[in-house]
């Protein structure tokens, strides 16, 4: 055993470059695997993980403190089945005027504000995302989902609050938090007077079903005086809504995660096996001095495991650091507080990587260990003739090309297994780039064609609750302001309604646009838009409506609203995601159900270059407090987070693929040090050496790019429908047709770019090395 250890240690001292290569490979592979597994794990059950970490409230109860006193509320924390409780926290509903720094004017938004002295507690730990918790009067922290950001100012009556931070409550128990002492003044400023509302938060032993939660709420209600409970909310409802929003993003995260894991495995096997093969000559020497095959294998496994161990230890730390910004963006996409790499991933990845390293080293070492000493020494000096000589002879006939180029182009044939593995790594890298760019283009198209982008401003008749119908006078007032407002491109009225859908589990949400419906930006999957003619009873529906009712475009269907029934024809399927059946119809068709139906909203499209927030503020100021104007900033922010995550994952995989090429080429140079020294001795210049090394992977990179582009397009065409299905929708063909011919040609060069960039570092070292040092390096 001592001899084996001494042989391994002496081998490390004599092969520092090889040890460095293995260490770097294991560092990048472990880091990438840690990030990939962290993303994959959090892609499934993100809400549940965050709910457990943040001690989310199973039940949120709003109570009237003038009916139930503090002792009675405290007693509910000792009810059977209650495992933890927090509160009472003072609560107030207000309409706040929001002023954003650098944007003139202000807009109104309804907020439920709660008084809490600290963000933590037994139930519902508030995760502070930026800024600080309120530590005095005039300060507020807002929930991230409101579209209000740190530095903004909220005006409530005569009181002004500065937003000092943004935070996340996993069950969205409030839209903002202030110090408890501010609640009373906010009630007075907001016009609610002395109404004593407070919030109680509970965790229960059994809260896994709606019936269990209903029983929990009933137990709290029965423990308090009649009329004390004003309302309640269940975490199950929040969970259902959050998971519906998460599911469309899971497929692409899984796709990127799997690609990253596969690349990591291939790089480890390629480099470790190559390192052992490069030492075949030394294996022959060890056998010549009396080492048994078992001792040879053990010494070489140790030789690769020692630097691999160091690389794994550093890699898991680097992986966690790399995961922080990615999971932060991921948490924004999933609308949860924070996400982190699970402990079991940190524990599992290094041993798994080391086991893979051992397997990658044992197999070629066993093969070399069974050779005779003479055969091992000869094999280590040069590959078998069938593995390279024919390619070199064929390349030598290309007399129009410089010899340095033909030598480089023929080099991959010397180690076909290593070349194929490198090819596959670059194929995955090129496919990831193609997939990432295509997916980004698809999501940009979805965003550009959505109502939030086409018509980002909406005006309604009041600031809180369900918007009422606008009277004729109110409609004229709004139209007058919109016509006079600079930046208005066009606008149209929107009337919302609900219909009973026989055979469906829930009612259908209906929208009647007062102008050409195509202006809404909602894409058609098939069919056409409804006719606005008074005699045409036509509707367009989303995919979920068709699925729930078993209908298709061209079918007729009977809608029910109260005592009214109307048979309509489905003339189109629209791209509208969500968990509710949706239908679109003309105001004339809607009036056949409700003759007195009046618009509730004005949807406004803006001229290019117009700030939606500034426009909203100006409209709010012109209309006064009796109207509410809002912009779709919150949806845009989440969409940007998704695109940012796609960019980060694409860059990560591209860098890892490039590192795989770099380490493979460095190992190849180390293996061919004698040949390079001979070339230099007979007159090869540094520039020719650089060109030879780069060409040794350029051909492989070009082939990989040509193969990787269709693979990436195929992956894109496979993942997008899965994402649409997860969002309960079909998809228009335009979401797949995002690649132009010129883009495909440029993407075809992605493999070549990855290969060349990865090879430049080792190639530069080979070019600078002197003849004597190159020969000594062997």
Image (tube, grey):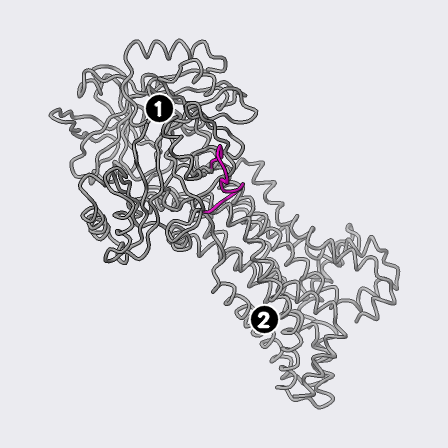
Label drawn at residue 463: 1
Image: 387 above or below 119: below
* Residue 38 rendering spot, x and y as whole percentages: 49, 56
* Residue 512 rendering spot, x and y as whole percentages: 28, 22
The residue shown at (29%, 25%) is 511
Nearer the observer, 272 or 199: 199
The quadrant of the picture occupied by the C terminus is: bottom right
* Residue 277 rendering spot, x and y as whole percentages: 67, 73
In the shown orientation, is residue 250 left or right of residue 276?
left
The quadrant of the picture occupied by the N terminus is: bottom right
In the shown orientation, is residue 64 left or right of residue 121?
left
Which residue does the numbered mark 2 point to in the structure image?
A: 357
Nearer the observer, 398 or 762: 762
Please state the extent of the stretch shown in magenta in the rendering: 127-140
Residue 551 picture quarter: top left
Mark 2 vs mark 1, CA separation in Å: 63 Å
N-term mark: 2 or 1: 2
The residue shown at (82%, 52%) is 687
């Amino acid at each position: 055993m001592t001899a084996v250890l001494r042989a391994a240690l002496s081998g490390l001292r004599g092969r520092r470059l090889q040890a460095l290569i293995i260490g770097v490979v294991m560092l990048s592979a472990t880091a990438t695997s840690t990030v990939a597994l962290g993303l994959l794990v959090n892609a499934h059950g993100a809400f549940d993980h965050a709910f457990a970490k943040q001690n989310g409230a199973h039940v949120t109860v709003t109570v009237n403190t003038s009916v139930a006193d503090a002792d009675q509320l405290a007693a509910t924390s000792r009810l059977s089945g209650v495992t933890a409780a927090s509160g009472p926290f003072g609560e107030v509903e207000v309409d706040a005027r929001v002023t954003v720094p650098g944007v003139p004017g202000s807009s109104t938004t309804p907020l439920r504000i709660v008084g809490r002295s600290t963000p933590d507690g037994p139930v519902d730990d508030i995760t502070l995302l930026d800024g600080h918790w309120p530590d005095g009067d005039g300060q507020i922290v807002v929930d991230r989902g409101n579209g209000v950001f740190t530095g903004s100012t909220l005006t409530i009556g005569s009181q002004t609050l500065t937003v000092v931070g943004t935070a996340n409550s996993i069950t969205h128990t409030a839209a903002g938090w202030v110090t408890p002492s501010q609640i009373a003044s906010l009630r007075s400023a907001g016009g609610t007077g002395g109404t004593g509302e407070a919030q109680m938060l509970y965790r229960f032993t059994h809260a896994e079903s709606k019936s269990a939660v209903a029983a929990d709420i009933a137990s709290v209600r029965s423990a308090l005086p009649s009329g004390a409970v004003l309302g309640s909310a269940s975490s199950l409802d929040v969970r259902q809504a959050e998971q519906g929003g998460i599911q469309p993003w899971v497929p692409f995260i899984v796709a990127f995660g799997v690609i990253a894991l596969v690349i990591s495995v291939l790089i480890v096997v390629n480099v470790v096996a190559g390192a052992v093969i490069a030492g075949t000559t030394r294996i022959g020497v060890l056998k010549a001095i009396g080492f048994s095959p078992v001792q040879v294998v053990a010494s070489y496994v140790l030789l690769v495991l020692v630097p691999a161990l160091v690389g794994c230890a550093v890699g898991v730390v680097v992986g966690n650091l790399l995961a922080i910004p990615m999971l932060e963006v991921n948490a924004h996409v999933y609308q949860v507080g924070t996400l982190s790499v699970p402990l079991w991933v940190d524990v599992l990845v290094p041993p798994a990587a080391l086991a893979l390293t051992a397997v990658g080293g044992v197999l070629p070492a066993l093969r070399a260990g069974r050779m005779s000493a003479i055969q091992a020494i000869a094999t280590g000096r040069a590959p078998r003739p069938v593995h390279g000589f024919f390619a070199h002879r064929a390349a030598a006939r290309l007399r129009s090309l410089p010899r340095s180029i033909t030598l480089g182009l023929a080099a991959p044939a010397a180690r076909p297994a290593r070349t194929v593995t490198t090819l596959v790594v670059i194929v995955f890298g090129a496919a990831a780039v193609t997939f990432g760019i295509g997916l980004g283009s698809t999501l940009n198209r979805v965003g550009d064609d959505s109502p939030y982008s086409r018509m980002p401003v909406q005006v309604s008749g009041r600031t809180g609750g369900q918007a009422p119908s606008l009277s004729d006078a109110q409609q004229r007032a709004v139209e007058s302001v919109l016509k006079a407002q600079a930046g208005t491109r066009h606008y149209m009225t929107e009337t919302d309604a609900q219909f009973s859908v026989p055979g469906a589990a829930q009612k259908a949400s209906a929208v009647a646009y007062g102008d050409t419906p195509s202006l809404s930006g909602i894409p058609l999957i098939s069919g056409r838009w409804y006719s606005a003619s008074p005699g045409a009873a036509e509707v367009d529906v989303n995919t979920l409506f068709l699925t729930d009712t078993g209908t298709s475009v061209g079918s007729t269907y009977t809608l029910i609203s109260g005592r009214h029934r109307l048979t309509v024809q489905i003339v189109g399927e629209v791209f509208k995601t969500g968990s509710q059946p949706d239908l679109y119809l003309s105001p004339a068709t809607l009036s056949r159900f409700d003759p007195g139906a009046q618009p509730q909203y004005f949807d406004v499209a803006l001229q290019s270059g117009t700030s939606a927030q500034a426009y909203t503020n100006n409209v709010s100021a012109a209309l006064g407090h009796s109207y509410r104007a809002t912009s779709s900033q919150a949806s845009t922010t989440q969409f940007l987070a998704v695109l940012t995550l796609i960019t980060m994952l694409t860059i990560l995989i591209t860098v890892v693929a490039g590192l795989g090429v770099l380490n493979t080429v460095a190992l190849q140079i180390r293996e061919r040090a004698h040949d390079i020294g001979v070339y230099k001795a007979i007159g090869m210049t540094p520039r020719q050496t650089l060109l030879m090394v780069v060409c040794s992977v350029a051909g492989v990179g070009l082939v990989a790019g040509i193969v990787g582009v269709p693979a990436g397009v195929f992956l894109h065409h496979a993942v997008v429908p899965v994402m649409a299905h997860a969002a309960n929708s079909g998809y228009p063909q335009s979401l797949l047709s995002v690649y132009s011919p010129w883009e495909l040609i440029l993407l075809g060069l992605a493999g070549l770019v990855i290969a060349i960039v990865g090879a430049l570092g080792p190639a530069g070292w080979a070019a600078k090395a002197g003849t004597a040092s190159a020969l000594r390096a062997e």
